[in-house]
Image: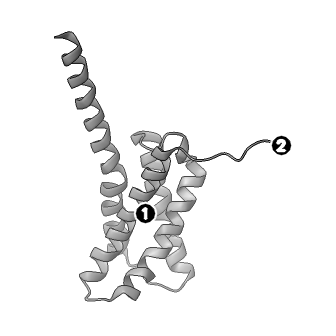
Amino acid sequence: MSSPRTLPASALLAAGIDAALVLVFAAIGRASHGEDLLGVLTTWWPFLGGLTIGWLIMRAWHAPQRIVYTGLGVWLWTVAGGLLLRVVSGQGVQPSFIVVTAIVLGLFLVGWRGIAVLVRRIQARRRASTQVQ
């Protein structure tokens, strides 16, 4: 019998960052309408579902910080899945909401990965320069 597989810490951290940023998206949107916590959770759950779908389809745990494959794929599935779940659950999906959702979640879900890549490159250069000296 094989042992159960566990996700690497980097994948758990990336999934947590993604989920937190989707929550921030919902909180910012609901705050602009003066809504309470229930409103935030009502907005959050469809996009959390879309995020989960994206992580599963893209197998994001294999390269959670990759921008092009993982970041873009997770972002697109989060937006599409979240909007679809909103429609199915009877929540509104206005054209302006679709545009704002795509832009903000794109900045959040792809953006943090871009920042992570830059930080790793800077750290690698610093390590390389200290080894040369």
Callout 1 amino acid: Ala
**In this rendering, which labeled residue sits more in front, label 1 or label 2?**
2
Residue 56 location (% of width, % of height): 59, 54
The part of the image, by quadrant, that contains residue 68 is top left
Residue plotted at (46% across, 69% down): 47
Locate the N terminus and report the quarter of the image it occupies: top right
Q: Relative to residue 11, is residue 2 drawn left or right?
A: right
Q: CA distance from mark 1 to mark 2?
A: 33 Å
Residue 112 location (% of width, % of height): 31, 50
Residue plotted at (24% across, 18% down): 128
Between 2 and 109, the one nearer to me in the picture: 2
Q: Mark 2 sits on what residue?
A: 1
Asked if 104 appears above or below 38 in the picture, the reply is above
Picture mark count: 2
Asked if 57 appears above or below 31 in the picture, the reply is above
Callout 2 amino acid: Met
Farthest top residue?
132
What is the secondary structure assignment of the residue under circle 1? helix
Q: Which mark is residue 19?
A: 1
Between 93 and 32, the one nearer to me in the picture: 32
The part of the image, by quadrant, that contains residue 113 is top left
Residue plotted at (44% across, 83% down): 42
Residue plotted at (37% across, 81% down): 40
Between 114 and 76, the one nearer to me in the picture: 114
